[in-house]
Amino acid sequence: MDADYLPFHPNPSKPTFVPPAGAVDAHCHVFGPADTFPYAPQRKYTPCDAPKEKLFELRDFLGFERNVIVQATCHGNDNRALIDALRAAGDKARGVASVAPDIGMDELRTMNDAGVRGVRFNFVKRLVDATPKEVFLSIAEKIEQLGWHIVVYFEAQDLEELIPFLKQLPTTIVVDHMGRPDVTKGADHPDFQRFIALLENNENMWVKATCPERLTVQGPDYSDVVPFGRKLVEKFPDRVIWGTDWPHPNMKSHMPDDGKLVDFIPRIAPTPDQQKALLVDNPMRLYWS
């Protein structure tokens, strides 16, 4: 583990908010264990081990029924830890993989059988090296045949240059972490409004109202992030999902209490109908239908 890398919270609090029956943590990860599933040589960071057993234990403790496990960059295109977790979870988990451009349809179908339903394209420059857009488009053509979607991860300052590419993608697109807005500018700033307009004008685009711990400047209790999440939940009630981001990779300022992250949910989705859409209806439609 990197010297400045924080391990996940060892003793999260029990949330006061009780998720609705069938709730899905739609963005989380598994790491290693490294002696079984080594980290990628080209990784930009080395996390602590966060195996599937710990994830499933947290799922049950927080009151969730299912997980969507997303491949993180520290494992590169080696999805063995992800596939192992999906097979262990059975119908309680789905996955989002990271794949190489030369992947074949037989391998993709095997991953589909294990529960993978999407691929992730990462454009965060501090985490990955640049990849030609043509490579991503060739992958998109393959996964479209399986009905998978594409998860895209970028930072707000890079959105404008990415918009033409995003409009080329032939599948449903899910944007990570609210599009990583600069919360110091406020939810009415043109930067966040550009993201809102993109979602309004492209009905194939979804968003994850996740990671207040990454977006905050204020720190816990993440009040500076609430207006962003609430606006997304209000404007796109049938295209927004939520997840913990456990075990919170590459966090260096503070390590969030996952119970407190669950208690953040009613602050952005105040009504029972919004909560059910965010945590049950939308992720079930996207990953289990």
Image: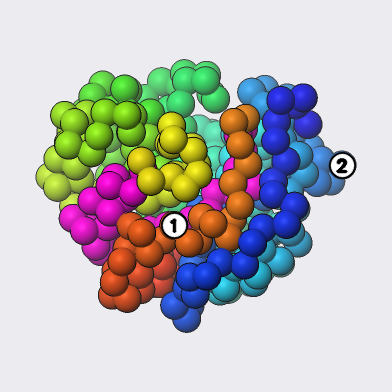
Q: Position of residue 201 (x, y in %)?
A: 12, 45
Picture quarter containing residue 63? bottom right
The residue indicated by pointer 1 is 264
Q: Nearer the viewer, residue 138 or 56?
A: 56
Q: Position of residue 288 (x, y in %)?
A: 44, 70
Give how far apart the Cα atoms at labels 2 and 1 are: 35 Å
Residue 248 belongs to magenta span = yes
Picture quarter containing residue 48? top right
Q: Quadrant of the C terminus?
A: bottom left
Picture quarter containing residue 5? top right
Q: Which residue is at 54% across, 25% downward?
A: 127
The residue indicated by pointer 2 is 35
243 in relation to 65, above or below: above
In the rendered structure, which amino acid carries the disc numbered 1?
Phe
Q: Which residue is at 37% across, 51% downward?
A: 209
Q: Which residue is at 33% across, 33% downward?
A: 183
Of callouts 2 and 1, the N-terminal one: 2
Q: Is residue 229 left or right of residue 9?
A: left
Q: Position of residue 98 (x, y in %)?
A: 54, 40
The magenta span reads: 225-251
270 in relation to 99, above or below: below
Q: Which mark is residue 197?
A: none
In the rendered structure, which amino acid carries the disc numbered 2?
Asp
Helix, strand or loop status at disc 2 = loop
